[in-house]
Amino acid sequence: MGPDNPSGPAGGDLFAAGGEAGRIMAAFDWASTSVGPVESWPASLRFAVRTVLVSRFPMLLTWGPDQLQFYNDAFAPVIGAKHPAIGQDIRRVLAESWGTVGPPIEHAMATLEASWLPELPVLLERSGYREETYFTVSHAPAFDDDGQVAGMHAVCTEVTGQVLSERRQRLLHALSTVGGRLGDEHETVSAMCRTLEGAPLDVPFAAVYLSSPGEHAFRRVAAVGCDPDAFPRSVADGGDELLARVRRLGVIGGPYGDQVTEAAALPLHTTRDADPIGLLVLGKSPNRAMDAEYSTFNELVAGQFAGAVANIRAFETERLRAETLAELDRAKTTFFSDVSHELRTPLTLLLGPLGDVLDDDQPLPEDVRAQLSLAMRNGQRLQRLVNDLLDFASIEAGRATPIRVRADVATFTAELAGIFRSAAERAGLRLTVDCPPLPRPAFVDPRMWEKIVVNLLANAVKYTFVGGIDVTLRADDDGFTLAVADTGVGIVAEELPRLFQRFQRVTGAAARTREGSGIGLAMVQELAGLHGGTAAVSSEPGRGSTFAVTLPYGAPDAEPTTPEVGPSEAARGEAASWEAASREDDIPRPRGEGTGPTGGASVLVVDDNADMRAYLARLLGPLWSVRTTADGAEALAAVAERQPDLVLTDVMMPRIDGFELLRALRADPATRHIPVIMLTARAGQEASVEGLEAGADDYLAKPFRAAELLARVRVALERAAGRTPTPLEPAAPGPAAVSYTHLKLPTKRLV
């Protein structure tokens, strides 16, 4: 039965299961070839052909001296556009790659040994160009009925995608490694370009252009794979000019030495919507199509360059920002130091004469002595604040160096704690001190250790209202630990990591006063660090806090003398200030009537500073009935007990501050009518506008003149009573005098 009748038993059964390849074989004129008509084929050829056709794996069979091809449908994509090539000489079909595949085929047929060639590079022209491909293939001899080699049997699978993916992944990893080295922008980009130079199969050439701040054009930074001068020094058209030059570059690329005729110009974006920061030009391999995988690879390469440049610029921005902040910090430290020095002279001229008058044997009227003592006490407090700022500025500037001497740390600590006993007792707190002698000598800077102990004790008194404070000193083989534990308000967990930062305050924490510089705990940590030690805190809201400072025993920095050390005047002054703030009549609770005339207007004074409350009560008492409270919470309780005719409140206070108090009064219809005058240490027009817009009737910045305060209180009371304010004589004649009769104060209230 001839080839024109393939449906007969000889042909139909043989090719029936072969799909498209089987139909091609069945219709092929085999009689015109060296294998002859199908019915004359030996059984071995029939068996081999049937095996090839039914396989779903790419398989190829050659037979006879002409090495005619038999293959299945799975093999057709291997030769691409050359399909169908069934019945043709394989040497002509694969002429471009015969130098690669021919030798292993001939070796298998001559030696009867099968080959195994993983990732074999094979040049194919299956898509109209010389294509770089890779196959894993095995060649084995095919035998005729007599056992003689009649052909070759090949099994193969294309692994081009896998090989290219792994190769490109290695390149991307290398780019990432180089690009991750933060440094000079141009040096990093040039190093990344040199990395591309090692991958000519995927990137025959490359050029990188970057923008500079304020410029629209991109300037060439680096180029590899060709003469850099072949690229323009700058471009501004998105790369069209560059792509037009590619054919003229004459670059040879790919594994077969073909000319590169195409390239891609990719903008470098730091984010999706941001303007490009540069342009990356990548040559395209002449032996690979620009398919989706190739395009994605180019985009990933561009992403590596964009990411590296973005990171470098972000790092540089952050570095400049850090330098600016450091410079500002140095300027601030210098400012603190200079201002502290400048403040010491007028403080000396204030405190010196005050001290001389108070120490004089000449009797003074009690009211005069009281006022001078008030001025002296607060001047000394200002002096301590100035000294703290100066000390902290010295630490920040690196000028503070501890001078360690041998000291009886246990006794010294107990003495320092002892000066706070009166303040604790007046506040109704228990103070226990357990400082046994240390087992070995300890060397500390006495004044620095004093600041550590005093700051921790002052902090404990400030935030403890009931219970007590425990001071303990414990030692081990490496050093000793001071612990100050209290039963105070405690600290929420999220605030603990920031607690030792300078100027850090725990928001909303109840305290005896909001006064303080905010550097006490920061100074504790810095001073501990100067001794080679650490500061730590553990706390639970509502149950108290424990601050622990651990220092090594240390070594002497001065002569091995043992000076007598004891609490300094500054430490005693600090303890005395907390004693004043913790007086029994200042324990938080609504106040009763103060001094002043009965039957007249009543004024509620709200301030967390005991001296300020006493001063305002003494100032207002001769004219009006005065009550005092220490914060907004007490004030609301006092208002609920009996409404005043006017509220005179500070702004910054613990628990409920002045603005919160004002909002609460304005929100209640029963108290909305009460005039409110706010006092604050924040000076300036913005602070005044803030208070008035919040609903205050008047706003007065500290420090203020007594006459001015009295005038404003009287005007507010008379206006609230529906009377025309009576004229008040100015405190002193002169152009600065003000007639409060004609003050036009805003009365708008936000409720």
Image (cartoon, rainbow, N blue to C red):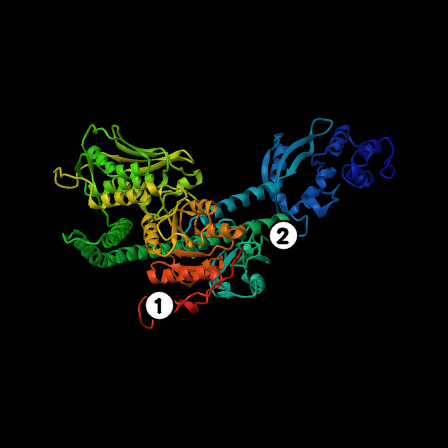
Front residue of this view, candidates 392 and 515: 515
Identify the amino acid type marked 2: Met
- The mark found on residue 729 in the picture is 1
Q: Is residue 42 shown left or right of residue 267?
A: right
- The mark found on residue 290 in the picture is 2
Which residue sits at x=37%, y=60%? 710
Does residue 718 appear in the picture of this structure?
yes
- The mark found on residue 378 in the picture is none
Which of the 4 quarters of the picture holds residue 407? Answer: top left
Question: Quick one: label 2, few (<14), some, or many (20+) residues within 10 Å?
Answer: some
Q: Is residue 391 shown left or right of residue 118?
A: left
Look at the numbered disc 2 and give the secondary structure of its residue.
loop
The answer to whether residue 355 is above or below residue 102 is below
Front residue of this view, candidates 124 and 323: 323
Q: Residue furthest top?
A: 146
Which residue sits at x=58%, y=43%? 165
Q: Position of residue 196 (x, y in %)?
A: 50, 51
Question: Quick one: label 1, few (<14), some, or many (20+) residues within 10 Å?
Answer: some
Q: Position of residue 516 (x, y in %)?
A: 33, 48
